[in-house]
Amino acid sequence: MASDNDIAIKVSGLHKSFRLPTERAWGLKQAIFNRLRGVKGYKEQKVLRGLDFEIKKGEFVGIVGRNGSGKSTLLKILAGIYRPEKGSVTVNGSLVPFIELGVGFNPELTGRENIYMNGALLGFSNKEVDEMYDEIVDFAELREFMDQKLKNYSSGMQVRLAFSIAIRADSDILLLDEVLAVGDEAFQRKCFAYFAKLKKAKKTVILVTHSMASVQQFCNRAIMIDSGKIIAEGNTRKVSQKYRDLNMEEDDPGRVTMKKGRGDSKYLSIKANAKVNTKKVTLDFQMEPKEKIEDPAMVVVVYREDGTPVYRWASDEKLDGELDLSQKNELHIELDNFFPDGDFSVTAAFASRDRSTDYGVFNDVMSFRVDPRNSYPQDVLWKIPEKFDLK
Amino acid sequence: MSILARKNKVLLKELIKTDFKLRYQGSVLGYLWAILRPLLMFAILYIVFAKVLKFGGDIPHYPVYLLTGIVLWSFFTECTGQGIHAIEQRGDLLRKLNFPKYIVVVSATATAVINLLINLCVVVIFALLNGATPSWSWLLVIPSIIELYALTLGVSLLLGAINIKFKDIGSIWDVLMQAMFYAVPIIYPISMVASASPFIAKIILLNPISQAIQDIRHNLITSEAITGWGYIGIWWSLLSILLVILTVAIGAAYFRKRAPYLAEEV
């Protein structure tokens, strides 16, 4: 048994239901009518049905589940925004929730004013914001826009600003909700770096997400919720597998079945193989289409154990021509072995080029190990010399 | 709930600042509107009632008297109007962060308080121009304003919390305010009512708003202005103060009870 001092969050017997109005008119008249007719006027919807779990200090826990499973409600209860209906939630230490980036942002205010407003919501005094103001602005790379109204910012700029303030939040416990889901490639990289930093700093973090990849990358532990109950808990790999199994029951084209080295989605099947020697790391993929795949793009990412992406290949960035997946294809990527010791996992993803349609995301389609016998004695990862060809 | 927690104070200050800034943003005259609005309203009512209908002929400094009434009444309507809808308007914030909800209501009413203070300066200038002599009794205006603000806050907390469940409250209150405008001695001098029917004048003076307005007129402009404690007696005027205290107590208690659920209902 861990002592109480080690526990950051303790949830026991947590229930929550919402009253959904059944009639569209939600006012005094309707309330009186309903009372007279003896109708309740609302439907009780159970969202959480008895959750029990503990989160220790310094843990990075992923909470996963499908849409409507109750995970966001749980997060809001942990954040103290909603009140538990039954059961209890004990939070040990200061807590900052990020249900959304840029809470309280007002389009009519300038970037500078929004920083102060958002800072106040995160619990910073004006003086504290004064002190970190320059760093925030520099990190967001928005110095020349600070006196412009937020409504003149692009959405990317807004997210950058919000994120730069958010990462200043200094509390014992952080609640993050799908923050990853927004922003472009570069932004996601910043996000990942921030998560890695949190993990290193031994912060207690709860991450609510759909993305199994980020759960596997960052979390020590995962909790999976379905219909308001915990249905799996523990090892991230195990929980991810269970999540995939659960989702497979539905006929979602982007969903994927996978065994080590091969995978299937509704659109295509893939075989993958990795070879490592002291000079080279080679990654081979064989794709076979099952259905017509329109305007496809393929992305391959190599992740280090701690979740840092170390190598990325995208067909629409690296290939001159278009990727044609109408027939069998082979992709061969040959990397100079600059990798340090450790385990690496490879994800291959297929989507339309505008990323609007998912053709299949093969998380962890293969992995390879670089051990002292074949590793490159250096920790530089980003500029890996590469060669590839697509037949 | 600690009102004085540093974090809450910062947030309150920041919300007030934004509200005030946003209110007058994009208008050419900007903050000047805070003064212009009641002044223009005053000009209209003055022409209609003092010049055309010949009200208030026997009241010394009637224009200032009228202006004071308008300024205080605008404060009351603006303040409750903002306060009642505050929770609704800041719903986005409530759904994403946990903080004491009353901050939202207080910050929404604060802009009206700032406007009132600016307008009172205008009233004082008018009073001086009109030949009123400054005296220590002017300081007695402060408790009356506190009384009026307390009433406003009580109403805002109570109705604001109910308004989340029954959106009708906002509209009902608007209509009620229209009616109340005539039930409070703003355009007509209370002395006119008193000479016609002392009973109705007494009823009118039981209203805490009428009392506050008359007290302020009495202390600021002319000691001839009829006050509640002078006309209906100390005990009866205490009753209306009790009414204010009761409104605040009920408003605060109800708001407190509803506060944990506002985020999911808004």
Image (cartoon, rainbow, N blue to C red):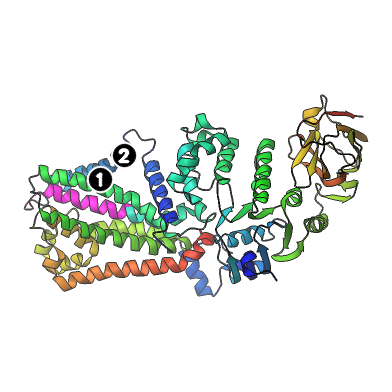
Location of the N terminus of chain B by quadrant is bottom left
Spot occupied by residue A170 in the image (x, y as percentages of width and height)? 55, 51
Which mark is on residue B30? none
Q: Could you say which is closer to the camera, residue B134 or residue B235?
A: B134
Describe residue B143's horizontal placement relative to residue B195 as left or right: right
Let me know if residue A269 is in the magenta part: no
At x 88%, y 47%, the residue is A264
Which mark is first along the chain, 2 or 1?
2
Extreme residue in the top direction: A320
Identified by mark 2, the residue type is Tyr
| Residue receiving disc 1 | B118
Vertically, is B183 above or below A36?
A: above
How far apart marks 1 and 2 lie (CA) works out to 10 Å
- What secondary structure is found at the residue carrying circle 1? helix
Residue wearing tag 2: B31
User: In the shown orientation, is residue A137 left or right of residue A374?
Assistant: left
Relative placement, left or right, of B65 versus A200 is: left
Residue A114 in view in this figure: no
Whether residue B69 appears in magenta in the rendering, the answer is yes
What's the amino acid at mark 1? Ile
Where is residue B115? Give x, y as percent. Answer: 29, 47
Above or below for A380 versus B17: above
Residue at 66% from the left image edge and 63% from the top image edge = A55
Secondary element type, mark 2:
loop
Q: Which range of residues does the magenta coloring cover?
A: B57-78
